[in-house]
Amino acid sequence: MMCPHTLYLGGNMTNKYYMPTRVIMGDDCITKNSELFIPLGKKALIVTGTQSAKRNGSEKDVKTALESVGIQYQVFDKVMSNPTISCVYEGAAFAQANDVDFIIAIGGGSPMDAGKAIALLAAQDIEEGSLFSGNYEDKVLPMAFVPTTAGTGAEVTQYSILTNDKAQTKTSIASDLLFPTVTFLDAKYTVHLGVITTINTAIDALAHAVEGMLSVRASSVSNALAVESIRMIMNCVPVMLQALQSGSEDVINLKQREQLLEASFMAGMVIAQTGTTAVHAMGYSLTYFKDIDHGRANGLLLGEYLKLVEMVRPDLAGRILAAMNFSEAEQFRELLSKFLGEKEEISSEEIDQYSKLAIQTKNIANCVVKPIEENIRTMFELSFAK
Amino acid sequence: MMCPHTLYLGGNMTNKYYMPTRVIMGDDCITKNSELFIPLGKKALIVTGTQSAKRNGSEKDVKTALESVGIQYQVFDKVMSNPTISCVYEGAAFAQANDVDFIIAIGGGSPMDAGKAIALLAAQDIEEGSLFSGNYEDKVLPMAFVPTTAGTGAEVTQYSILTNDKAQTKTSIASDLLFPTVTFLDAKYTVHLGVITTINTAIDALAHAVEGMLSVRASSVSNALAVESIRMIMNCVPVMLQALQSGSEDVINLKQREQLLEASFMAGMVIAQTGTTAVHAMGYSLTYFKDIDHGRANGLLLGEYLKLVEMVRPDLAGRILAAMNFSEAEQFRELLSKFLGEKEEISSEEIDQYSKLAIQTKNIANCVVKPIEENIRTMFELSFAK
């Protein structure tokens, strides 16, 4: 049998590549590279959630590094899950009131998404009605990011995803201004993440890599990174299943945590080029209306979307499945089901509402295999079938 | 048999990633994106060689784009192959005398290498004795690059490689200041490259990808890009052999030219992370003393180095060979021999001299499999054996 990976993966030669963030990886990389904060300014605002950055040691390491190079700081630790527009305006006002020069975001996707919006809003006046317009002045505070989960990839993307109550969904600010200047990847902050968070964030990263390969903007670069990211996450599947069965995250060792963190960063580089597709479009409603965790929402839908792709473009699904060492999408769907356990209830009214919202998103236009509204409804139904 | 590509490729988690250049690809991408020149300044210096940029249409397209957005320009078209230090000082003086705001380099590696040094030297005073010191002020003219060969990768690296008569070799200026702001990849400028130039430049790109995987700085990101780059170049091997046999470059179509250009850009991203290794260290003497083309010099040596790696680290060689669909390094050496034809004469005195120079380079320290001087001598001997 011919090795499936010898196929030419790329792509669309009419394409672009841009990802200017400097990424530093490794044990104690923050304190070992504290000089990287110096060009960012004299006073920092640390943007984070209420607890995890304190518990996992990342906030302490950032403060140690800042103190070693004589940089002052303030802390804004009010970022909630799925941060709201009012939260980021509050953070920006706090940044301005404290006259900070740059932003350090520490945490999972939520503090990083909030940190980007705060860096933008602290540097220029943008009314709430124009927040998602994409029309901004060329001004933003520099940013240093420390992801403490391995899923979002926000540390290397130009997206800030906020809860948008007017549109009843999560909406992206997308601007090249939002790429962080520098990102520090130290897997030790992820070691004590619980089993469910570890799994949901890994599924989120996997969704980024898979959806990147299903985007009309996929390129040879993004596909190469996506295939390797998928392979690295799949390498960690056995130990994540073991963690799920034993109920303990301790079976996942530091080396595996590093692999998940690096895979998540690479998947972030992918979506920085490609954007996301139907799965994210549909998943946002599950998070907004039913408070289902973002990674889990993607995981619930990803298997069914890959099955749809398999029917229309078996070549495209085949490349993704080959990176997983699977031969058909049903195997992947079954694996996701193992991870996700019992599924939530969803009514046909909810499916109707979410399908109507999803079909209007730009993520659908970004799909190589574009679902119509009926496909979306069917995917929701099958994803939640007991 | 297990597919060899399912092995985990990465890497050293203590690592870095940085490549801030914006890359635009596709047919007519320069004239379609002329607004990208606007933020670079009001007056450009076009740095190029004497002829090829005029013949292949790239210089005309750049001028059309500049005129469409009202940017003035001057042309410095005196860059020779393997540009000298005096050439780049002359270019920098010309840039200052004409008060240009930014540099546009058009051509193969030579104009791009020269363009970077000119951008640096026009922005700050650096004495010749400090040119390779790495200690510079944080000032450089912005750069827009247009590669017209598919080999060097200089359009996405921080290296400017100059002929250094004092050190009797080619020496790199390496600085993050030297990443171009923007790079345009349009394969139509490469369509009329002759067979030998096409082959030598493709081998250069292949050497970058292979050496990147053999560097102590290899990471999951660089390995993923390297594997895909190798695969894309190997896809074009049959048509390049056909071109060699028929003596006509016309058998290589635009799609294949695009693949070679994209592979070369990806291999450039690789060495921006990893640097090069023993092959480049040895090849520089062949170019400096014997005027052997840079890509050909690498090709002459690459097979023997991979055979050495295969003996010491068969796992590492195996990953590279798997991307080529080969099972042993000898197959690769034979393929290179087909491309290279009759080899130059080399004396044992020359081998002695070049080996002594190579062993001192930092490229050797960069190797996972570090050759000693005797290994280098043997590789030179075997590489030129008739």
Image (spheres, coloured by chain):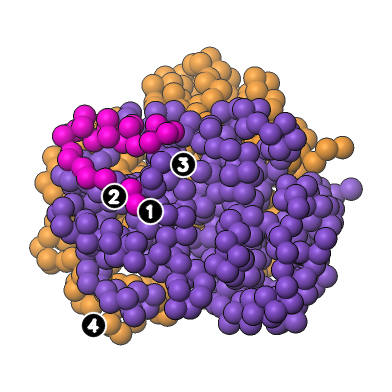
Chain colours: A orange, B purple
Q: Secondary structure at mark 1?
A: loop
**Which is nearer the N-term, disc 2 or disc 3?**
2
Tell which tag, 2 or 3, sits nearer the viewer: 2
**Residue matched to label 3:** B148
Q: Residue flagged by tag 4: what amino acid is it? A: Gly
Q: Chain of mark 3?
A: B
Given the image, on which type of amino acid does mark 2 rest?
A: Phe
Q: What crowding class fits label 3: few (fewer than 14 Cα within 10 Å), some (14-19), or many (20 or more)? A: many
Q: Residue at x 49, y 16 (%)?
A: A373
Q: Are marks 1 and 2 on the same chain?
A: yes
Magenta region: B54-78
The residue drawn where x is 20% and y is 36% is A135
* Vertical position of residue A355 compared to residue B131: above or below: above
CA separation, marks 4 and 3? Answer: 47 Å
Q: Which mark is residue B76?
A: 2
Q: Which mark is residue B79?
A: 1
* Location of residue B135 in the rendering, given as x and y in whole percent from the top left corner: 32, 77
Which of discs 1 and 4 lies nearer the camera? The answer is 1
Name the residue type under label 1: Val
Residue closer to the observer: A5 or B359: B359
Of residues A299 and B165, the one drawn nearer to the viewer in this rendering: B165
| Relative image position of residue A194 (x, y in whole percent) | 56, 62
In the foreground, A154 or A313: A313
| Chain letter of the residue beneath label 2 in the structure image | B
B354 relative position to A348: left or right: right
Per the image, the residue denoted by label 4 is A70
The local secondary structure at tag 2 comes to strand
In the structure shown, which secondary structural element does the residue marked by tag 4 occupy?
loop
Residue type indicated by callout 3: Thr
